[in-house]
Amino acid sequence: MMKKLKCPILPFRSPVQKIYFIQKIGGGKRTMDTEIHFSNIVHTLQIVGCHFGAKPEGWSYPRHHHYLFELLYCWDGEAMQTVEEKEIAFAAGDLMVLKPGVRHGTRNNTADTYTYFNVHFNTDDMELRSLLTSSSYKFLPQTIIRQSRIPGYIKEIEALMQKELIDPHNYQWIGNQGFLPLQATHKLILQSYILLILKEFVTLLGASGHEAEKSSPQTYALQVNVAHAIESRLQSMIFSKAVIADIAKEQNLSRSQCSKIFTQVYGMSPRQYLSELKLNQAKKFLLSSELTVETISEELGFASVSHFSRQFRRWTGVSPIQFRPKH
C-alpha cells in the first residue's frame, strides 16, 4: 500500500520545488522531470435568469416549479418564502438553494422594499446534485453566510452589473426589466463567481453536517454521458409526438434504467423534463407570438387542442387563453 505523506507548509518558491521535497521525504527517486495531474473535469454549469431585483410592499410571485436549481440571496428587506407547504422567513443576508421540481413562491408582506439576488442553474456534477437534492431546499441564515465569502462575491457581481449599466448601449429595457448581453470575458467572470458562491455554500453545508453520496468516477462518467444523450433527444422531442420509450431503445436501456440514470444526473425524470421543455415553449408562443392555441397545440405534438389545454392548466393552474396577455 502506498504511504500517504503529509506535506508540511513551507515557503517553496515554486510548485516544482514542493514536488521535489515530497519525493525526497518519501524516499522516491529525486528528479525534476515530474508531473502532477489533476483529474479531468467534464461537468457543465448552465446559468439561467441571473438577476438582481427590488420589489415593493405587497409584491408576490405565485407558486411555481421548474427543472432548474434556484439560488436566492436576500440583499435587503425581508420576504416570506413558501416552499411546498412550508413558510420560511427570509431576511437580509439569508441564502437558500431550491432543488428542481419543488413548488415555491415569494411575497413581501413588509412595508419595506425587498431586494434580492437570484440565479437558476443546472449542473451534471453528481456529487453536487446529490448534496443539493437530499431535501427540497437548503437554507443558511445570515449568521452563517456572513462568515463566508458569499456576500463579497455577490457584491462583485453587483459591481459587474453597475459597470455594464454605465453605458446605455450595453443593455435594453423591456417594461420594468433590464437585460445585459454580457461580453465573453464578463460571462466568464459571472460564471466564475456563481461557481465560487456554490463552492462556499457547499463548504458551509459540509460544516453543518450535510454529506453527499459518492459514486465511482467510472460510473459517474458513464451516467453523465448517457444522461446527456437522453437530454439531447428530449430537446428534439419538443415539437414531436415521440415517446420516452423510443429514447430508451436507442440507448439499449430499459425504460426504468433510462429514467433512473437521467434522474440521478438531472434531478427529475425524462417525462418531467420534457414537460418542462414543452411548457416553457408553450409560454414563449403565448407571450411572444400570435399563433392560435390550436396551432401551438399542433406545434408541440399534442393529439388535440383540448388535451393541450388540460395539460397547460395542470402545469400552470390557468388555461392558455387566460395565460396569454390581453392587448
Image: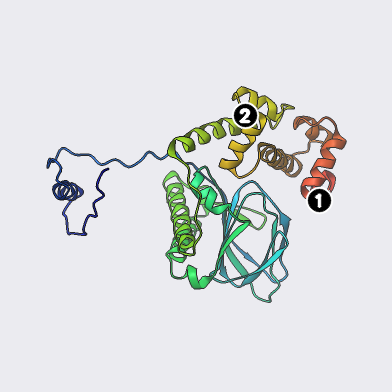
Q: Position of residue 106 (x, y in %)?
A: 68, 63
Few, some or many residues within 10 Å of mark 2 (<14, 14–19, 20+): some
Image side of residue 227 versus residue 55, left or right: left
Label 1: how many Cα within 10 Å (few below 14, some 14–19, many 20+): some
The reply to whether the C-beta atoms of the residues labelled 1 and 2 are less than 8 Å apart is: no
**Quick check: 156 above or below 288?**
below
Please, what secondary structure does the residue beneath circle 1 have? loop
Q: How many marks?
A: 2
- Relative placement, left or right, of 40 versus 272 is left
Q: Using the numbered discs, state the Cα–Cα distance from disc 1 to disc 2 in whole angstroms.
A: 28 Å
Q: Residue at x 48, y 42 (%)?
A: 215
Image location of residue 326, percent across then percent down: 82, 50
Image spot of residue 56 (x, y percent)? 67, 69
Name above or below for residue 92 compared with residue 313. below
Residue 181 appears in view = yes
* As drawn, 27 above or below 251: below
Note whether residue 160 is visible.
Answer: no
Q: Mark 1 or 2 closer to N-term?
A: 2
Image position of 269 (left or right of 192): right
Q: Which residue is mark 1?
A: 317
Residue under label 2: 233
Q: Position of residue 302 (x, y in %)?
A: 80, 32
Q: Amino acid at mark 2?
A: Arg
The label on residue 40 is: none
Quarter holding the N terminus? top left
Looking at the picture, tell me which residue is in the foreground, 142 or 212.
212
Question: What amino acid is found at the position of numbered circle 1 in the picture?
Answer: Gly
Q: Residue at x 14, y 46 (%)?
A: 27
